[in-house]
Image: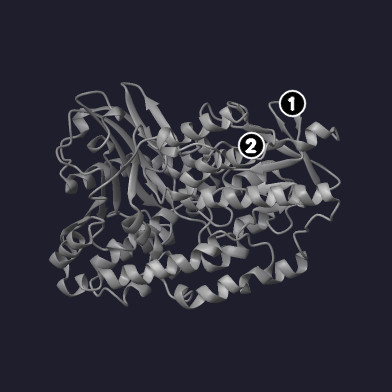
């Protein structure tokens, strides 16, 4: 395994967005890359599923935010994103339905947005622009931190961190921060339900994440024509063009070590030597499967069992005969008692009045269902598997409840028109898609699991992480930024090795454990 050509090769485990972006960036540097994907297609959960009857569904993410980072990655590889995928900006971005108390169509047109908010709370409409001004400054302050690799405790007091702290208000929650601008809880919900993208509660999520809603309004909510999988396929096409060897249906069984250094992977009964390994998989699952516990002293099995996780989701993918009227591309039904609904999820209770998100991509994209038919994606936030809910028993009841909740959105006649149906429960996320404890949004983004305290991009000797479970965190644009950090660290480490300099150590485990 000491062969020079093998030491140059990078093995990437998982062809999700982070793995694909890392492959592109490393191939750009002339590094030979082999990417192993256990499934039959690239994208991980960011792929488009083809179902019987001609229906197509996004499996996980259903839209793109802040495409600038992905455009930068394509340009760095000599390509233009728009030559490969059509990203269509949505207006309105989504339709919010506050159960029993009004509705709002979210738009990036600030005058129209103020008018929408004024119908709910006239006084709050005056604070929309000041809120955006504040978050524009917050994003600018936080961008250097997002782009920074947190490799030592000293990074927590870097000049960028110290400059940003006054704007980040780390001890406030998203909802608490929004109270400075909006008195009406419905308006606060309109700018805070986005914490669900992280699988977290707006009443607990750090106030930094008010930038999520700001990103939507400032930079747009986009639908890739053909579904989000079209972006993954475009990335794979560029990677292959650059010489990346993508091996589908090839799960990696473990990372191989020699004297504490990763030297390759075992996949499909074969051994593949590599000088560096990038892991792009669900963090909790990948660690237990791939990395011996002795090689991850800070993230032992016991630590993984104590880690705070996001919520899960109960999914319905429905192929319908006929249309669904004027249903918007994205519709969110916010439960009448939203705070109780969130509390129940946190406490492991299946809510009888949950919030529901519905994607009707056919409102924008006719390619996702046959003519005269409709593909519907229905998501209900629910507790993860640590709550010991018997999903074999509860799934039929919760399917019925979800269909009943859809009636509040005017979808009262759909059951007789269902021609394709697939359900994914938290148990299914774990068993079918290798999601640790069914926590679909990975590790929670509380302060004790962010920045330096999140799993590091440089995870061990010759092992690197990319994806929602490592710094900077979850969400497609953030994962793409993480790929840039990971690729940069890997290249720096190779330069050190080439120059004969000592390789960076993870740091004193005693110090790390004391901090975490």
Q: Position of residue 275 (x, y in %)?
A: 77, 40
247 relative to 342, above or below: above
From the viewer's perspective, tell me whether residue 493 is left or right of residue 502.
left
Which of the labelled discs sits on residue 462, or is there none?
none
Q: Residue at x 63, y 57 (%)?
A: 455
Q: Look at the numbered disc 1 and give the secondary structure of its residue.
A: strand
Mark 1 surroundings: few (<14), some (14-19) or many (≥20) residues within 10 A: few
> How many numbered circles are shown?
2
Q: Residue at x 75, y 59 (%)?
A: 506
Name the image quarter holding the C terminus: bottom right
Q: Residue at the spot x=63%, y=33% of the render?
A: 35
The N terminus lies in quadrant: top right
What is the spatial separation of the Cα atoms under label 1 and label 2, in whole angstroms? 23 Å
**Mark whose residue sits in front, 1 or 2:** 2
462 and 68: which is toward the camera:
68
Q: Nearer the viewer, residue 123 or 241?
A: 241
Q: Specify whether 125 is left or right of 42.
A: left
Q: Earlier in the sequence, mark 1 or mark 2?
A: 2
| Percent x, y of residue 458 | 69, 53
Discs 1, 2 touching: Cβ within 8 Å: no
Residue positioned 82% across, 47% down in the render: 498
Horizontal and vertical percent position of residue 265: 73, 35
Residue receiving disc 2: 27
> x, y (%) of residue 10?
70, 38
Q: Secondary structure at mark 2?
A: helix
Give the residue pinned by disc 1.
270
């Amino acid at each position: 395994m000491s062969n020079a050509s093998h030491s140059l090769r990078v093995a990437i485990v998982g062809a999700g967005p982070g793995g694909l972006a890392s492959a592109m960036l490393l191939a750009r540097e002339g590094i030979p890359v082999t990417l192993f994907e256990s499934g039959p297609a690239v994208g991980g959960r960011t792929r488009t599923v083809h179902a019987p009857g001609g229906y197509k569904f996004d499996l996980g993410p259903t839209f793109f935010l802040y495409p600038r980072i992905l455009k930068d990655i394509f340009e760095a590889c000599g390509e233009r994103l728009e030559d490969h995928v059509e990203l269509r900006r949505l207006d309105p971005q989504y339709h919010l339905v506050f159960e029993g108390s009004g509705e709002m169509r979210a738009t990036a047109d600030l005058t129209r947005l103020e008018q929408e908010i004024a119908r709910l709370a006239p006084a709050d409409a005056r604070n929309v622009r000041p809120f955006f001004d504040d978050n524009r400054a917050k994003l600018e302050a936080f961008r250097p931190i997002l782009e920074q690799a947190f490799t030592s405790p000293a990074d927590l007091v870097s000049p960028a961190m110290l400059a940003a702290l006054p704007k980040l208000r780390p001890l406030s929650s998203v909802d608490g921060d929004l109270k400075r601008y909006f008195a009406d809880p419905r308006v606060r919900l309109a700018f805070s339900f986005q914490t669900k993208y992280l699988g977290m509660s707006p009443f607990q999520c750090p106030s930094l994440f008010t930038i999520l809603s700001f990103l939507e309004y400032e930079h747009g909510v986009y639908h890739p024509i053909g579904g989000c999988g079209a972006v993954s396929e475009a990335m794979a096409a560029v990677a292959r063009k650059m010489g990346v060897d993508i091996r589908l249906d090839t799960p990696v069984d473990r990372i191989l070590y020699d004297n504490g250094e990763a030297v390759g992977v075992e996949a499909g009964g074969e051994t593949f030597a590599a000088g560096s390994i990038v892991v792009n998989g669900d963090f909790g699952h990948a660690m237990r499967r791939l990395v011996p516990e002795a090689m991850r002293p800070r993230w032992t099995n016991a630590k993984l069992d104590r880690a705070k996780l996001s919520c899960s989701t109960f999914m319905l993918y429905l192929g319908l005969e006929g249309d669904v009227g004027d249903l918007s591309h994205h519709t969110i039904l916010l439960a009448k008692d939203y705070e109780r609904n969130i509390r129940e999820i946190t406490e492991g209770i299946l809510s009888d009045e949950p919030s529901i998100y519905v994607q009707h991509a056919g409102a924008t994209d006719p390619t996702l269902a046959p003519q005269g038919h409709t593909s519907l994606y229905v998501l209900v936030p629910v507790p993860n598997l640590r709550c010991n809910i018997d999903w074999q028993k509860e799934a039929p009841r919760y399917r019925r409840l979800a269909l009943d909740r859809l009636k509040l959105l005017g979808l009262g006649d759909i059951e007789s028109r269902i021609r394709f149906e697939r359900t994914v429960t938290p148990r299914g996320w774990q068993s079918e898609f290798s999601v640790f404890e069914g926590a679909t949004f990975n590790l929670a983004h509380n302060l004790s699991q962010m920045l330096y305290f999140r799993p590091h991009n440089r995870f061990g000797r010759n092992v690197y992480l990319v994806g929602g479970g490592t710094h900077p965190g979850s969400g497609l644009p953030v994962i793409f930024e993480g790929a840039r950090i990971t690729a940069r660290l890997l290249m720096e480490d190779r330069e050190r090795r080439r120059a004969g300099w000592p390789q960076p150590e993870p740091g004193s485990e005693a110090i790390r454990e004391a901090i975490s």
